[in-house]
Image (cartoon, rainbow, N blue to C red):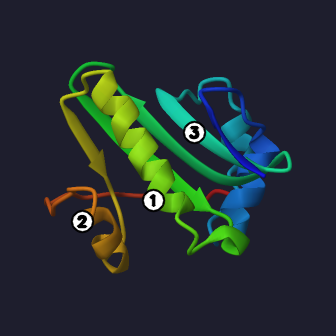
Amino acid sequence: MTKYIENQPVSAKAIANLREDVGWNRMEDSYRNPLMTSYFHIALYDDNILVGYIDSVSNGVTDAYIQDLMVHTDFRKKGFGTELMNRMIAALKERHIYMISVIFEEKLKPFYSRFGFFDMLCGQIQTYESE
């Protein structure tokens, strides 16, 4: 049985395992770093195993950035990613965040467009290789 848990601690190892499953670098040391903070996050568990996760960072007033939307490969195409996004957007709206942004690959544009996200010019740079 799956359950959604909001703003409760999630182990760095569980996040790293999920990141690895979706094809990203683990970044386990980064998630262990006490400076790593989250404004609001939602974890999705199946039998106490992390199978979905979404996080946001924010200044708490004007802007929030959604990051790390992940759904384990065994749980895809079942609506969990959509539900995580809907819950995150609702939570940020409840907190009266003025602007919500997300960075995504071109192939994911149809998914994010469903939530009202539109194209804007942005840039990104990776400053080091992580595990």
Whether pointer 3 and pointer 1 mark residues with C-beta atoms closer than 8 Å, the reply is: no
The answer to whether any part of residue 127 appears in the image is no
Q: Residue furthest right?
A: 47
The answer to whether any part of residue 26 appears in the image is yes
Residue denoted by label 1:
82
Q: What is the number of the mark on residue 43?
A: none
Dot 2 amino acid type:
Ser
**Residue at the spot x=61%, y=62% of the render?**
71
In terms of secondary structure, where does tag 3 sit?
strand
In terms of secondary structure, where does tag 2 sit?
helix
55 or 24: nearer the viewer: 55
Q: Mark 3 and mark 2: span between their CA atoms? A: 21 Å
Mark earlier in primary sequence (3, 1): 3
Query: Is 26 situated above or below 57?
Result: below
Q: Is residue 113 left or right of residue 127?
A: left
In terms of secondary structure, where does tag 1 sit?
helix
Dot 1 amino acid type:
Thr
Mark earlier in primary sequence (2, 1): 1
- Crowding near the residue tagged with mark 2, few <14, some 14–19, many ≥20 C-alpha atoms within 10 Å: few
Query: Is 54 situated above or below 61?
Result: below
35 or 80: nearer the viewer: 80
**Residue at the spot x=72%, y=65% of the render?**
20
Q: How many marks?
A: 3
Tell me residue 127's x, y (percent).
Answer: 47, 53
